[in-house]
Amino acid sequence: MHPWIGAGPEDRDRILAELGLSSADELFATIPDAVKVDSLGLGGARDEAALLREFGDLAAANTPVSSVPSFLGAGTYHHVQPAVVDAVLQRAEFYTSYTPYQPEISQGTLQAIFEFQTMVCQLTGLEVANASLYDGATSLVEAALMAHRVLRGKRNRVVVAETVHPMYRRVLHTYAGALGIEVVEVAPGDDGRTSPEALAAAAGDEACAVIVQSPSFVGTLEDLGAVAEAAHGVGALAVQVVAEAVSLGLLRGGGDHGFDIVCGEAQSFGLAPGFGGPHLGFFACRSAHVRQMPGRVVGQTVDSEGRRAFCLTLSTREQHIRRAKATSNICTNHGLMALAATVWLELLGGEGLRRVAAASLAAARSFASRVAELPGWRLAWPETAAFNELLVVGPRPGAELAGELARDGVLAGVPSRLWGGSWPDGLLVAFTERTTGAQVDALLDAMGRIR
């Protein structure tokens, strides 16, 4: 049978006979009828041209972020997308490769992963990084579980700022609950930042990790030095989460502030927003904890002839070692996405990344300096430092404002209370280097028409 042609009727009959079944329905008898789908409603067969027209009509129902002024963010950001990134990704030797089990035939993949790890270390200020994870949410979970292992399971509490991305916190609750680890959330103060003293009080002598996000979900910058000191003061590991990785082009990573782990989402590095994915998690820690780090580490060595070479130095996944000794079973190197980030970062370089970050910050500041002039509108925390995302409060709830502005032709932001939270009900408005002055004008004009 050709590998790309599905099983035909004779093949299905032979498989069912081998299983001792009379029909495919018997094979799925254990699935409740309430969740079964009788028909996909695809209709009859179509020729290629008709099918392409139908797909085109479906695609036309979407609104590409490049077609209207867009200020959507909340963990997924629209940054510059150089064509060379996709050109490299589509090379067959990368596009079709899998885990580099055999280093002698995987040097290109291993080198790319090694370079990704190196740049993550440079950006986070930490000594060692792994070969990436699924996304920011799973990287946060891995950080909490790693802290639990480092402290040998003697502390069963994780303290997390409420301003960590709500979806990340949901995933953390799912995993921690199953393992009997208590998760305590700490609400932000009046300035939109999380009090280090409140984090320490919640941690007590039971916490293995204290976790903050900076820039936070609501855009504010935390006092990372004070948070790290507070975490260490109660004997916990300090963890920084970063959902907008471009911020590391201007802001020092948590490693430079004393954090033990810096993790988060690298979607901003060359991955276009695409209906929620694919994303790319990153993870860095201090070398003292490397054997408790999830995933795998690619190292640089020399071959038998003394030439530079690369290999898997640490492989702590359940695929490589006994399941009971694995540090994680939810991680992958997500190699193709890590490659995209690597190409993007190397193309821009350090100066290019700083320029992207600075342009994003400048666009946010331009908006912030003008929004207070609009009747009924204000920044939630005008005196608190932020990067490229701002929480704006208007004359009505955020969900209503987002809908009205969208009907006016502007994707103005994400309702801040979409996932709950104790912060004000408004719009999270994100700016990147792609934001033009004309787009900021269009946003402010549309906001000014709302009463």
Image (tube, helix red, strand yellow):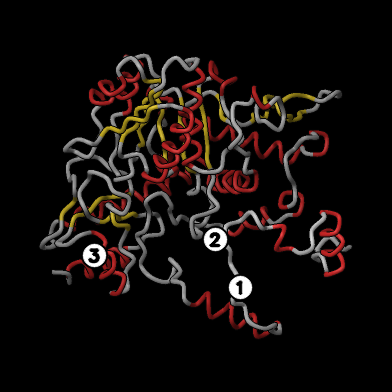
Q: Nearer the viewer, mark 3 or mark 2?
A: 2
Q: Secondary structure at mark 1?
A: loop
Is disc 3 surrounded by few (<14), some (14 to 19) or many (20+) residues within 10 Å? many
Q: Secondary structure at mark 3?
A: helix
How many C-alpha atoms fall within 10 Å of the one at disc 2: few (<14), some, or many (≥20)?
Answer: few
Q: Earlier in the sequence, mark 3 or mark 2?
A: 2
Q: Residue at x 71, y 36 (%)?
A: 110
> Disc 1 designates what residue?
39
Judging depth in this view, the residue of 29 and 279 nearest the camera is 29
Which residue in the rendered view is the most extreme toward the left? 375
Please name the amino acid that badge 2 sits on. Answer: Val
User: How far from the left and from the top, in percent, is residue 192?
Assistant: 22, 40
Compare residues 99 and 51 and report the one nearer the observer: 51
- What percent of the width, then of the height, locates residue 361? 33, 48
Q: Position of residue 133 (x, y in %)?
A: 57, 39
The amino acid pointed to by label 3 is Leu
Badge 2 is on which residue?
A: 35
